[in-house]
Image (cartoon, helix red, strand yellow):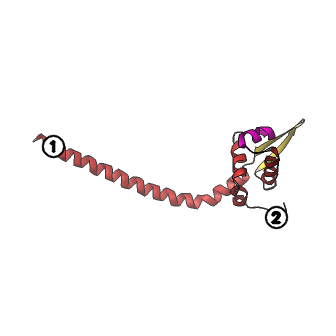
Amino acid sequence: MGMQLDVFQVLADPTRRRIVEALRHGEQQVGDVVEKAGVHQSGVSRHLRILSESGFVSMRPDGQRRLYALRPEPFRELEGWLTPYRELWEARLDRFGAALEKKQQQQQQTRRVNDRSQRK
């Protein structure tokens, strides 16, 4: 690959995301990734090369086998990019939670008032 892809370009491909998901639980051989990702071996090999060149995946030789594993650095880069947005949606969720709680309290008060008026 001539140029370096950024993390979003790398993960934009659904096949690469399936491969990343397959590797999420630890080292895998290509055959295991093929089985879990549901892609032909030639496709998995091509995408593993792209993931490796972009720093997402490392390869460790083990005798005749090659074991592939995820590397944490690109995910840290993603997390760093997402942090300001996480703060944005968490603030919105906090406001939503407060509004929901207020509505539930109002409904409980209304039920209590209705229960009292029915007892009279």
Question: Which of disc 2 and disc 1 is earlier in sequence?
Answer: 2
The residue under label 1 is which amino acid type? Arg
Helix, strand or loop: magenta stretch: helix
The numbered mark at residue 29 is none
Q: Is residue 95 rendered to the left or right of residue 7?
A: left
Of 6 and 30, which appears nearest the observer? 30
Disc 2 secondary structure class: loop
* Residue tagged 2: 3
Look at discs 1 and 2 and give the one toward the viewer: 2
Say above or below: 106 vs 32: below
The residue positioned 78% from the left and 56% from the top of the image is 54
Task: Specify start and end residues of the magenta stretch as a single range.
Answer: 26-38
Expressed as whole percent of the image width and height from the top left, the position of residue 102 reads 33, 53
The residue under label 2 is which amino acid type? Met
The residue positioned 76% from the left and 61% from the top of the image is 5
Residue 118 among those drawn in magenta = no
Q: Is residue 45 rendered to the left or right of residue 9?
A: right
Q: CA distance from mark 1 to mark 2?
A: 73 Å
The residue positioned 77% from the left and 48% from the top of the image is 57
Disc 1 secondary structure class: helix
Of 119 and 34, which appears nearest the observer? 34
Indicate the quadrant containing the C terminus: top left, top right, bottom left or bottom right.
top left
The residue positioned 12% from the left and 40% from the top of the image is 119
